[in-house]
Amino acid sequence: MPSGIPMSLYNEILEIILIALAIINIQEARFERTANIMLYSLIIWCGFCTLEVLNDTCGIGIDVGGWYTAARMMAFQLMYAFIVFSIYISKPNILIKYLFFWGSLALFAAFWVWKQKYIGLTDAENQWIQTRGRLTHILYGGTLIRYFSIYSDAANFGIGIASTAVAFIIFGITSKIKRHKYFFLLVGAACTWGMFPSGTRTAIACLMAGFMAYLFLSKSIKIAIPFTIVFALFVFFLAFTKIGNGNQQIRRMRSAFDKNDASANQRTINQEAMKKYMKEAPWGIGMNIGYLNVPTNNKYTFMATVPPDSEYVFIWIHTGIIGITIFLICTAVMLIGACRIVFFKIKSSSLRGIGAGLCCAFVSQQLGGYGNQVLMQFPNCLVFYGGLTIVYILPHIESEWIEYENKLLAKQEERKKLKLEKKKQSRVKSIFNWI
């Protein structure tokens, strides 16, 4: 690429082209579907992040290019995901195609982590894990490797794949179409297995949080009871037994229930130190402020160099108590609005299952953002904020969904009848042959 041109500029051009192509390609854009509470919340958050361009708390001057790089990651890409999903997910068949596409990519990610664990890393992966990733991905004197599949790192993979597991298991148990159900459950099972080689302990909490949210959104005792039983057994297995302790990945995940864990305690110590600095920086230290552009004698050098270890803490550092408060309120409003749609507005049980799965995956991912810096990472940001966008579209396509589903159910019944008839004919034929 030509030197001097920020790499993000190419991303922006590509995104604008994709949105333009989507608008040209789609027959009915139906932009009225975008006027919802999620859009208004994102406008507020993006507006605040735009004002942050004026933040010069560190006294090192205003860097518009640096601000835009950070604002794009923390805010503008959320709006991009919202626009793209609102435009594209316009019909039931497109929704199903998207879920199958997402599921296929998740299956590949699960396969690739299996390949890394049992066959080995590629040369590029091995080079990364032996250099930049060594401190966080090779543990216990080299006896435990945290695998990362096709993601940027193990935490991003573990939490992303755990949230995907939540979504697809819920899709699977609520789908009425057998081939959809089997595919969704296969993806859910593969993703649940896939989070263990990542060694990301927060992933366990994310999985549990997603399923707990579903107990509320399911609106069905028949679903809630078995879900509660399986969930309780899973927690009991990890928290109160030593089963599987011979496996290092399981031992690593089990340490998530250890209150005396050194890693968690270090994060607490760091955050207590941060609070003292942040009292004097209610707007944060500024966007894209880091160890590369803050002098060593600056008052906020510690804040610019300390590992945030959490997406929420990262937002708090760079936008202050004002910024993290606005972000949390906007996130809560978007989620509550989506849950309200699932709980009150959608009548179809299978479509409600899709909405519930997407809401619960979003809850799971938000908890991951509390524990690790993964919320705005690719592909999690696109997948889970885009997924929440889909929930707001579901009431608009419900009538079409019911018609679409009935056609598939009719074909499913027809195939079932043909199978029974063939089976019956083969039995009659075998009886005549025997005679």
Image (tube, rainbow, N blue to C red):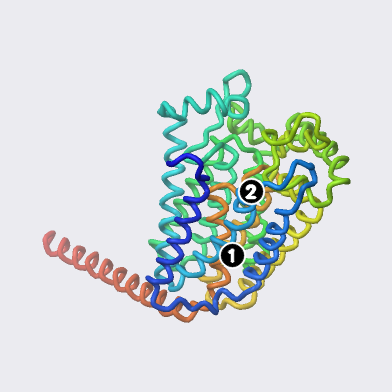
Mark 1–mark 2 Cα distance, whole angstroms, equals: 31 Å
Residue sitting at the far top: 141
Residue drawn 42% across and 33% down?
115
- Measured as percent of width and height from the top left, residue 14 is found at 45, 55
Check the picture and name the quadrant holding the N terminus. top left
Taking 208 as reference, is 411 above or below it?
below
**Sequence order check: which comes first, mark 1 or mark 2?**
2
Marks 1 and 2 in Cβ contact (< 8 Å):
no
| Residue in the foreground of this view, choosing between 396 and 347 | 396
Taking 309 as reference, is 434 above or below it?
below
Q: Is residue 289 left or right of residue 129?
A: right
Q: Nearer the viewer, mark 1 or mark 2?
A: 2
| Residue in the foreground of this view, choosing between 403 and 179 | 403
Q: Amino acid at mark 1?
A: Ala
Please tell me whether mark 1 sits on a helix, a strand or a loop: helix
- Measured as percent of width and height from the top left, residue 272 is found at 85, 38
Please tell me whether mark 2 sits on a helix, a strand or a loop: helix
Residue drawn 37% across and 70% down?
25
| Residue in the foreground of this view, choosing between 372 and 427 | 372
Residue 207 makes an appearance in the image: no
Residue 145 makes an appearance in the image: yes
Which residue position is annotated with label 1? 356
Q: Amino acid at mark 2?
A: Ala
Which residue position is annotated with label 2? 70
- Measured as percent of width and height from the top left, residue 293 is found at 69, 36
- Measured as percent of width and height from the top left, residue 386 is found at 54, 61
